[in-house]
Image (cartoon, rainbow, N blue to C red):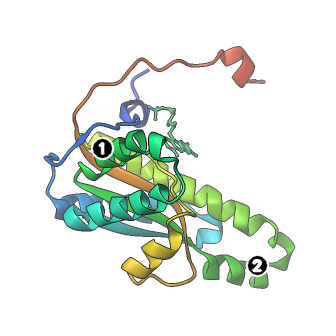
Amino acid sequence: MTNPTLASLEKRRSQYVLGADAPLAPAEIDALIRQAIRLAPSSFNSQSSRAVILFGDESRKMWDIARAALQAIVPADGFEATSTKLDSFAAGVGTVLFFEDQDVVAKLQADFALYADNFPVWSEQASGMAQLAVWTALADAGIGASLQHYNPLIDADVARTWNLPASWKLRAQMPFGAHKAGFGDKTFMDDADRFKTFG
Ligand SMILES: Cc1cc2nc3c(=O)[nH]c(=O)nc-3n(C[C@H](O)[C@H](O)[C@H](O)COP(=O)(O)O)c2cc1C
């Protein structure tokens, strides 16, 4: 089957070896990321996802924050590997920080009490959809990325550094840049254990 969406999804992989020479200019990447998040669905169209898009030195600042936070907790003999990994993220073009606005979640809970327990879950799901939309759009544009989770360790420093609203809860970090390595083969579990189709 040839399907452009499936072809795009297939292109999206975790790229850890990033370069600063992406095929698009920062303004074009910024527009791509914004549109991908705009188009991603959310419960009740609540649009709870927020993003901070960092380029160049601002992105490197993000990975310095992670480095300082990790240095405080990773044993000294394991820190070199951690630091090397952070270097690879900082070597890219930029980083997307994904947030969910907890004020939006709280308002939905107040307005639709029947679903109150669901809104935090749906907010997380909306974040995942926004993340996949951005990751896939970047992949389609020939830009590599990976998904990282240094939250909640870095939350306070991130909020302070970019002066972000207290209601923005950091959910993921996506460093992106030029592809500087290929990908290993990806294995897939048995369809029989994963899918059931009826009718
Ligand atoms: C919810 C979620 C959390 C993930 N967290 C991390 C992470 O913290 N660090 C990381 O390097 N990759 C993370 N990944 C990436 C997965 O490890 C990766 O997508 C998976 O191994 C499949 O490889 P692929 O992305 O190349 O298809 C995460 C993926 C998902 C969907």
Label 2 belongs to which residue?
109
Residue 145 seen anywhere in this rendered image of the structure: no
Residue at 51% over, 68% down: 99
Task: Look at label 2 and name its amino acid.
Answer: Gln
Q: 50 or 43: nearer the eye?
A: 50
Please tell me which of labels 1 and 2 falls first in the chain: 1
Residue at 57% over, 81% down: 167
Dot 2: element: helix
- Drawn side of residue 174 relative to residue 111, left or right: left
Q: Establish whether ligand 1 lies closer than 8 Å to the Cβ of label 2.
A: no
| 1 or 2: mark nearer the eye | 1
Label 1 belongs to which residue?
88
Task: Look at label 1 and name its amino acid.
Answer: Ser
Provide residue 61's location: percent of width, then percent of height.
30, 66
Residue at 18% over, 65% down: 27
Neighbor class of circle 2 (other Cα within 10 Å; few <14, some 14-19, many 20+) is: some
The N terminus lies in quadrant: top left
Residue 160 seen anywhere in this rendered image of the structure: yes
Q: Find the distance from the CA under tag 1 to the CA under tag 2.
A: 40 Å
Q: Where is 70 relative to 34, above or below? A: above
Neighbor class of circle 1 (other Cα within 10 Å; few <14, some 14-19, many 20+) is: some
Provide residue 70's location: percent of width, then percent of height.
48, 56
Q: 43 or 84: nearer the eye?
A: 84
Residue at 63% over, 56% down: 125
Give the quadrant of residue 111: bottom right
Dot 1: element: helix
- Drawn side of residue 136 relative to residue 122, left or right: left
Provide residue 16's location: percent of width, then percent of height.
34, 38
